[in-house]
Image (cartoon, helix red, strand yellow):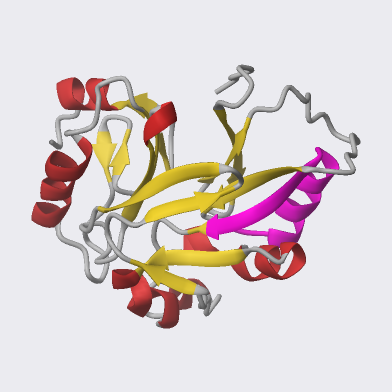
């Protein structure tokens, strides 16, 4: 997304980790170019979603482009979405937030699959949020939408004013998240998509945890899993 309208939300992304996870940062467009090597006395704050890996590199890359991390939000706590949380939080001072039903995955290395890869990752959010929670960070407002199915505490984040949805591993372009992991349920995931996501406007742009972006309208029309 390359939105240069001042005051509108813009979305940046990084592709990180062993399974190529999309990590997103959302910020209020301020007319700056944010090229490498540009420093500002007042860096642009961002909301960072799912730091998948190498939190130190995320921090360095953003800092080098005149950004600062204001808050970190998790769509879910599988290993491939939390590998960089600790470092990024420590370096930036940003607090970490997750949906309250994801507590077990945050704490259990077997449940979040990190033990399978010898990583043994856990994360300690500063706060667990409820379904429908209104969030504010980096000068932006957005809502947590509980969308269980991929995991019991999977959620999406909806920027209503800018028609942006950070969908994690709930909804992909032409597909949905896997449900054969601990706590997964295909019937629950399908219900989440229909009741929480397909009620959004068709022109909402969907930014998933893996693969390319899409729209709610396209997924309603073409997604054979739903």
Q: Does residue 58 show up magenta in the picture?
A: yes
Residue drawn at the location 64% of the way across and 21% of the way down: 6
Q: Is residue 211 left or right of residue 184?
A: right
Q: Is residue 78 left or right of residue 34?
A: left
| Residue 218 is at least partly visible in this image | yes
Image position, residue 43 (x, y; %):
80, 43
Q: Does residue 73 show up magenta in the picture?
A: no
Image position, residue 82 (x, y; %):
52, 64
The quarter of the picture where the N terminus appears is top right
Residue drawn at the location 62% of the way across and 59% of the way down: 53
| Residue 168 is at least partly visible in this image | no
Front residue of 59 and 163: 163
The quarter of the picture where the C terminus appears is top left
Quarter occupied by residue 132: bottom left
Front residue of 181 and 128: 128
Image position, residue 25 (x, y; %):
59, 43
Instruction: Count the labels in the image.
Output: 0
Front residue of 142 and 165: 142
Q: Which residues are magenta?
A: 52-72
Q: Is residue 10 left or right of residue 57?
A: left
Residue drawn at the location 58% of the way across and 19% of the way down: 3
Q: Is residue 124 above or below residue 8?
A: below
Q: Is residue 139 above or below residue 32?
A: below
Q: Is residue 100 left or right of residue 10?
A: left
Image position, residue 65 (x, y; %):
81, 38
Quarter occupied by residue 207: top left
């Amino acid at each position: 997304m390359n939105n240069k309208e001042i005051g509108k939300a813009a979305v940046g992304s990084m592709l990180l980790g062993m399974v190529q996870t999309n990590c997103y940062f959302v910020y209020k467009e301020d007319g700056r170019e944010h090229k490498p090597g540009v420093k500002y006395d007042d860096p642009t704050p961002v909301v960072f979603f799912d730091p998948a890996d190498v939190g130190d590199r995320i921090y360095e890359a953003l800092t080098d482009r005149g950004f600062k991390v204001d808050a970190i939000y998790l769509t879910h706590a599988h290993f491939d979405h939390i590998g960089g949380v600790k470092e990024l939080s420590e370096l930036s001072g940003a607090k970490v937030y997750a949906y309250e039903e994801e507590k077990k995955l945050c704490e259990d290395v077997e449940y979040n699959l990190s033990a399978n890869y010898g990583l043994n990752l856990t994360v300690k959010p500063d706060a667990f949020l409820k379904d429908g929670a209104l969030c504010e960070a980096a000068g932006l407002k957005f809502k947590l939408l509980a969308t269980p199915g991929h995991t019991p505490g999977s959620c999406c984040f909806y920027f209503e004013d800018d028609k942006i949805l950070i969908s994690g591993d709930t909804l992909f372009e032409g597909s949905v998240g896997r449900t054969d992991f601990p706590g997964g349920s295909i019937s629950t995931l399908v219900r989440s998509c229909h009741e929480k996501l397909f009620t959004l406007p068709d022109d909402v742009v969907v930014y998933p945890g893996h693969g390319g972006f899409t729209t709610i309208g396209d997924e309603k029309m073409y997604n054979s899993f739903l």
